[in-house]
Image (cartoon, coloured by chain):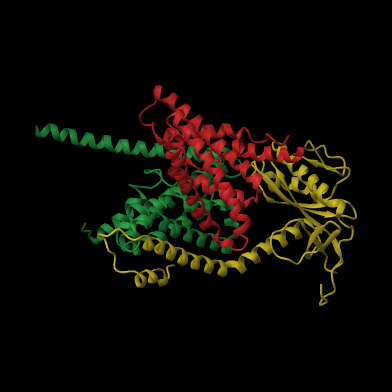
Chain colours: A yellow, B green, C red
């Protein structure tokens, strides 16, 4: 837990503790500098040691979410949305205008996984949903982030009958929330009794996502490059 | 101050019950109440705090002779923040699920007044052995308090403990207990209970003392 | 100038921090002054103002660090927040003392107390976790500070009243304050859903 290095700099750099004299400002500054240096080394060490695992965890979490919202998908690629369409995203770093493309076992494009976020009942809800451009349908929805009320609002991801609303949902003209049990059209979602606001929020966030993304997305995505060929 | 070996353990035990940082001193609750909505979260937060407090106390007491008085607080904060960063990354790498639940409240361990308080009041003035014992006791007491809060809130709020259902499906959970108000109310009621026990204890002692005085007079 | 959507977004951040996700009553941040100092309305108000001021400074510092420094060294987040915020607040304290002794007497005395307040670090962490822009950070800080002041004032008012009523001695003290806080927190939960209909 504590490396011996932590104390060594002090014992070599400084004289034995003079109690009577006011310590000079050089000594004050050097103490802080040494503390900062040692702490910096410790922090960089732990960062380097955990970086790989953390990156892998995050990538796996994202992959699992994409596979969950796009049934039948076994391979994913990051896409970058730009003014003149989409391209494969190769760069690391902050995701902005990033979406995900899913491919099946044969390497054929299946659909997009689109992120969207907005205010819920209590705090921001972050969603990833699967979208098939050919049929203009939402085929899966996963809540990535939410602080909705436990026992009520959290049913948006715990209540499987609500989640299954998004398994085959038409987005035209737009998705609408209706009272539970009244679902009759392909673009309707049964709200959760007692959590209407959270249910409506989910639908609104997906509608907003549609508005933001789908008009710019080509129907057949980008074909997967052949195995081994340069991207 | 001559301390016998037994008092090392007394040093440790006092933190757990008599001077319990939460229930008696009401210290360090600032952001920690937020994660006591389940026993697992409380346990994770308690252990993370344990690591930070014991580590910082060990280091501060080891270096107490070299840290000039004027910059001591800054030095302590740097030491504490370093330990917090270490535990933050460790949790993120090894237990990403728990890290997600605790979220922003892990870095907030740095602002826990209990930790800085122990460095200033104890670790900077005592030998390594006592400092560590004191830290273990205080952190143990803190862990115990968080577990008690998290346990009570999960049992009432979800009818479960550590995720294991206790009362079967017919139990109607008191959802309010796992929401923020439940945190305030549970801590308030536990403090009330502690007050009541102390009061009873005092009364009992008075009753014991009085007849003795009468007899002697 | 500002579109409707942008305005609504800012309003949501503000109201969310002020009421729905009140720093004290929903996140338990800044409990120490909330339970310790809030005995008098006047003091509470000034403490609230001073805290809001420090929160805004914090938001600015956190945004600058997060935009220009931390992308190169993400692991320095916690340490740099603490060190930079503490130093900037100390510097401003000295500045106020020099420039306006009157202002210092009414607000400045709280500054050292506030720096150790968990709400400050909490704001820096929440704002950067949510990747707020500069303007969003400032609005967030205003909402959080306003919410803190509001909670402090409500608490102080209730406590001033309770001084005059007949509360059993066993309950008086922190336990009593916590239970009041619990009830306030319940009331504030009623603000949830304000923006979702």
Q: Quadrant of residue A88?
A: bottom right
Residue B117: percent from left, percent from top: 38, 50
Q: Is residue B163 visible?
A: no
Residue A144: x %, y % from top left? 69, 52
Left or right: C175 as drawn, with respect to A203: left
Quadrant that contains the C terminus of chain B: top left
Along the line of sight, the residue nearer the viewer: A23 or A227? A23
Q: Is residue C154 left or right of residue B21?
A: right
Is residue A101 at least partly visible in the picture?
A: yes
Tell me what residue is drawn at x 41 percent, y 50 percent.
Answer: B114
Extreme bottom residue here?
A228
Give the answer, above or below, for where A112 lies relative to C177: below
Q: Nearer the viewer, residue A31 or A90?
A: A31
Tell me where residue B19 appears, x and y as whole percent. 34, 47
Q: Quarter of the image containing the N terminus of chain B?
A: bottom left
Specify the farthest residue to the left.
B217
Q: Nearer the viewer, residue B65 or A183?
A: B65
Residue A208 % position (x, y): 79, 45
- Number of labels in the image equals 0
């Amino acid at each position: 837990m504590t490396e011996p290095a932590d104390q060594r700099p002090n014992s070599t750099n400084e004289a034995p503790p003079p109690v009577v004299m006011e310590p000079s400002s050089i000594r004050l500054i050097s103490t802080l500098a040494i503390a900062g240096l040692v702490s910096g080394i410790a922090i960089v060490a732990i960062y380097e040691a955990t970086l790989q695992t953390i990156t892998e965890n995050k990538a796996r979490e994202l992959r699992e979410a994409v596979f969950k919202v796009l049934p039948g998908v076994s391979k994913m690629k990051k896409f970058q949305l730009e003014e003149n369409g989409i391209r494969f995203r190769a760069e690391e770093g902050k995701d902005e205008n990033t979406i995900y493309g899913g491919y099946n076992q044969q390497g054929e494009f299946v659909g997009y996984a689109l992120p969207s976020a907005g205010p819920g009942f209590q705090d921001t809800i972050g969603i990833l949903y699967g979208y098939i451009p050919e049929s203009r349908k939402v085929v899966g929805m996963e809540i990535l982030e939410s602080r909705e009320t436990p026992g009520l609002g959290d049913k948006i991801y715990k209540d499987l009958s609500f989640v299954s609303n998004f398994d085959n949902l038409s987005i035209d003209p737009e998705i609408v929330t209706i009272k539970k049990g009244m679902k009759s059209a392909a673009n309707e979602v049964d709200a959760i009794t007692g959590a209407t606001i959270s249910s409506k929020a989910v639908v609104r966030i997906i509608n907003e996502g549609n508005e933001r993304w789908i008009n710019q997305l080509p129907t057949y995505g980008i074909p997967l490059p052949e195995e081994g060929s340069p991207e | 101050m001559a301390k016998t070996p037994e008092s090392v353990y007394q040093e440790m035990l006092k933190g757990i019950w008599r001077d319990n940082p939460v229930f008696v001193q009401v210290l360090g609750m600032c952001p920690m109440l937020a994660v006591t909505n389940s026993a697992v979260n409380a346990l994770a937060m308690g252990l993370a705090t344990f690591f930070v407090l014991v580590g910082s106390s060990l280091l501060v007491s080891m270096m107490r002779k070299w840290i000039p008085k004027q910059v001591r607080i800054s030095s302590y904060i740097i030491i504490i923040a370093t330990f917090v960063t270490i535990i933050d990354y460790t949790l993120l790498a090894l237990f990403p699920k728990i890290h997600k639940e605790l979220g922003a409240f892990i870095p907030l361990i740095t602002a826990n007044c209990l930790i800085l308080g122990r460095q200033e009041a104890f670790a900077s003035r005592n030998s390594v052995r006592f400092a560590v014992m004191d830290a273990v006791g205080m952190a143990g007491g803190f862990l115990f308090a968080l577990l008690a809060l998290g346990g009570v809130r999960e049992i009432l709020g979800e009818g479960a403990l550590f995720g294991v259902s206790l009362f079967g499906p017919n139990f109607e959970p008191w959802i309010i207990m796992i929401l923020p108000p439940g945190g305030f109310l549970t801590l308030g009621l536990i403090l009330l209970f502690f007050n009541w026990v102390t009061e009873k204890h005092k009364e009992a002692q008075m009753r014991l003392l009085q007849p003795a005085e009468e007899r002697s007079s | 100038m500002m579109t409707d959507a942008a305005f609504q977004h800012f309003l949501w951040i503000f109201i969310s921090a002020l009421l729905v996700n009140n720093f004290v009553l929903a996140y338990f941040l800044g409990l120490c002054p909330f339970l310790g100092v809030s005995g008098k309305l006047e003091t509470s108000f000034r403490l609230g103002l001073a805290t809001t001021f420090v929160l805004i400074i914090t938001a600015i510092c956190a945004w600058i660090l997060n935009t220009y420094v931390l992308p190169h060294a993400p692991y320095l987040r916690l340490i740099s927040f603490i060190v930079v915020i503490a130093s900037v607040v100390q510097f401003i304290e000295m500045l106020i003392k020099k420039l306006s002794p009157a202002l210092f007497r009414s607000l400045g005395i709280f500054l050292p107390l506030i720096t150790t307040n968990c709400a400050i670090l909490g704001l820096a962490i929440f704002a950067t976790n949510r990747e707020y822009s500069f303007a969003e950070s400032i609005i967030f800080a205003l909402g959080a500070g306003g919410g803190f002041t509001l909670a402090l004032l409500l608490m102080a008012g209730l406590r001033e009243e309770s001084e005059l009523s007949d509360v059993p001695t066993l309950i008086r003290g922190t336990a009593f304050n916590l239970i009041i806080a619990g009830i306030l927190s319940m009331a504030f939960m009623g603000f949830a859903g304000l923006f979702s209909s």
